[in-house]
Image (cartoon, helix red, strand yellow):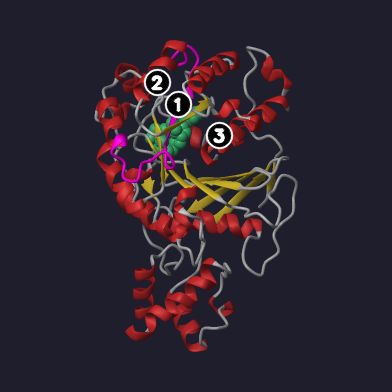
Amino acid sequence: MSLRSANSPSLSRFAWFVSGRAAAYLWPMSATVQTNPFVEKAPLELYVPPAMPSLVGLTRAELADALGEAGVPEKQRKMRVQQLWHWIYVRGVRDFDAMTSVSKELRAALAQRFTLARPEVVAEQVSADGTRKWLLRLPGENNERPHEVECVYIPETDRGTLCLSSQVGCTLNCSFCHTGTQRLVRNLTAGEIVGQVMVARDRLGEWLGMERIKAPGLPTEGDRAISNIVMMGMGEPLYNFEAVRDAIGVIADGEGLSISKRRITLSTSGVVPMIARAGEEIGSMLAVSLHAVRDELRNELVPLNRKYPIAELLEACRSYPGLSNARRITFEYVMLKGVNDSIADGKALIRLLKGIPAKINLIPFNPWPGSTYECSDWEQIEKFSEVVFNAGYASPVRTPRGRDILAACGQLKSATEKLSARERMALRAMAMTD
Ligand code: SAH
Ligand code: SF4
């Protein structure tokens, strides 16, 4: 099914599930988050593998084991892995029969046991400017209740950013985030995370030997359609560590999808004990959802702060393996009107980050049905970003590109005008990949 929508409200940032179905899972936010102590939901749903597992998303070692199951002798496995890797991740084949350099017998043996399936695309939304959003269906428990996650593609003229989900829902309950209100939580498998990239490439035609789709707003043939990945969809990636690590390993593999770890950003709400491990074992760029400069406020916005307060979080950031001026941590700061957007907050933010090679990403709040916050006025965002800019941080909303985008929407000059969905997306993608 293909849904074409020029300006869907849910295209705005990565606010998930503005659909009726998800609305049924809404928690009474104000009551739950603001009055309760730290609440963390337990994952409710388990992954039940399909009868025929997909080879998509397996590490090279796991793929070698799978080949072993299909009768490939150990000595040949490395070479066969190499062949399959090319067919799966460079050519994007979905059928073993297309693997013409692989013997017919092996193709048949593989097809008896495995598939090359990716998540099923339930709906596709294409905005006028080329932004695409896919609603993907994943198997639920006992194949009874399928889960859905979204994957968003934000193209720019010379690059494209794909935003991936790591969990269905999220066990954390950030008070400004729609995902946290979802009741269902299940970790995605590495295959389902890599599968989102496969789906996006399928839909964009970005495989060797395939014709890229041409549409307004998409990068041209000379540039990669998907050049950057952000783990900023649903879920807390560091609560699904192994799957995220393995998936990023597959996505970054230079002989396959080949999106370098410098172009992959993992966003965390601040799971302090996992940050060092993320640096060592994943090695992607890191973004930290800070959103507040005082523990009291951060406890309310990001309840995980009660477990890992700001000082501990920043200490973990200071010692993030590989941190340097060339490899900075992005601090995300959602602009909430009258909550965290004062000039004093801006100055405190600068003081707090002193000494950490950092980028600051101001995110206009994206409201959702039932949310209790409002997005800061544009004038206030500009003032705040000036504080950030004057302290020497490239402030995304001040870049020429940002200005272009803002200029495209004249009303933004007005103090009370809210950002449109498209501008939020554009600013965000730009901030993450600049
Ligand atoms: N769980 C991870 C990654 C997914 S959320 C994390 O929290 O970092 C990705 C980013 O979107 C985070 O910075 C999050 O705080 C922000 N975000 C969530 N809901 C938002 C909303 N309604 N408006 C703007 N940003 C939001
Ligand atoms: Fe949303 Fe991220 Fe908080 Fe989870 S950790 S509720 S995805 S902002």
* Residue 297 x/y as whole percent: 35, 17
In this rendering, position of residue 427 left or right of residue 218:
left
Residue positioned 39% across, 78% down in the render: 78
**Tag 1, which secondary structure?**
strand
Label 3 and label 1: CA atoms lie apart by: 11 Å
Residue assigned mark 2 = 349
In this figure, which residue is indicated by the disc labeled 1?
333
Q: Main secondary structure of the magenta part?
A: loop
> Is residue 325 on the magenta stretch?
yes
Decide: is 396 above or below 390.
Answer: below
Magenta-colored stretch includes residue 297? no
**Badge 2: few (under 14), some or many (20 or more) residues near its Cα, within 10 Å?**
many
Q: Which residues are the magenta region? A: 317-342
Which label sits in the foreground, 3 or 2?
2
Q: In the rendered view, does 116 fall on the left or right side of 355?
A: right
Find disc 3 in the rendering and name its residue.
428
Q: Earlier in the sequence, mark 2 or mark 1?
A: 1
Q: Position of residue 42 (x, y in %)?
A: 29, 40
Q: CA distance from mark 2 to mark 1?
A: 10 Å
The amino acid type, in three-letter code, at marker 1 is: Tyr
Side (left or right) of 48 relative to 408: left
